[in-house]
Image (cartoon, helix red, strand yellow):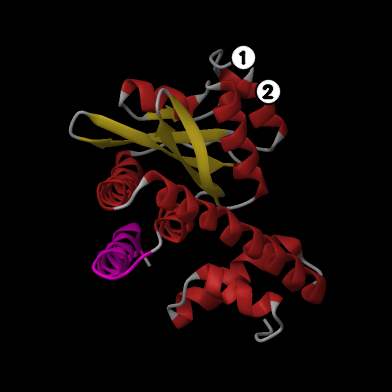
Amino acid sequence: MTVGHHLTDAMTRFARTFLGDYDVGEVLYELSETVVDVLGVDAAGVSIADADRLEFVTATNERSIQLERLQCDLQDGPCTDAWRSRQPVLVSDLETVRAWPAYRPGALEAGVRAVAALPLTAGDQTVGALDAYSATIRQWDAATVSAGRVLADMATLYIVHTRQTQDARTLNERLQHALDARVVVEQAKGVIAQRHGNVDTALERLRSYARTNRQPVHEVARRIVDGALRL
């Protein structure tokens, strides 16, 4: 399936979700998973603006969780630069840049070589940033960046709409659900890896089943952890 087909399928799915009773935390987690599939990257994450700083919301695996939290702790890195500048920050090889002296060593140590950080903008607001991570050197071509910006716009739509219709406490609770969903996915990956002896393919087995059966990844993960589904 081409990037265009992946993107069309994703946009249809998220548009339908928007019309129903959705949980913004779960949606942002699923959207991060979609970024991985559509852009062909190794991990992705979302952080949102809270007053004058970025706060980590969700990410697809331990690597991206670590990097999202690192950037938010430091308030420095590609993600924060994209948020402040309202422009994409595209890094093909972290080894060759001098920016972010506190962030860059941690990213390289975590096995990340390339990053694409996309701002989440709505009018004159910048509500956060979406990050895509690659374990290898990556030239971020125009088609990939364009697809990423479409998904970033979808994330923005959900965040802005939720802020307009719910109070801050409800929003925070829903965003916490995104972290909880990620924990369940990591647990399910462990179950699958223990069964098949290969941690590298555990997430792909999980994603493949979810895509084939058109079910959210976190719901499939919950069934695996509960013993109701065996992959």
The residue nearer to you, when weighing 189 against 187, is 187
Report if residue 7 lies within the magenta region.
yes
Q: Residue at x 60, y 67 (%)?
A: 204
- Amino acid type assigned to the residue bearing label 1 in the image: Pro
Q: Quadrant location of the N terminus?
A: bottom left
Estimate the x, y position of residue 163 in percent, counting from the top left: 30, 46
Disc 2 element: helix
Q: Is residue 177 left or right of residue 81?
A: right
Q: Which mark is residue 105?
A: 2
Bin the neighbour count of mark 1 within 10 Å (Cα to Cα): few under 14, some 14-19, many 20 and up. Answer: few
- Amino acid type assigned to the residue bearing label 2 in the image: Pro
Q: Residue at x 61, y 72 (%)?
A: 221
Verify CB contact (< 8 Å) between mark 1 and mark 2: yes
The magenta region covers: 2-22
Depicted 68 relative to depicted 2: above or below:
above
Q: Residue 44: tell me if it is visible.
A: no
Depicted 51 relative to depicted 42: above or below:
above
Q: Which mark is residue 101?
A: 1
Q: Residue 142: tell me if it is visible.
A: yes
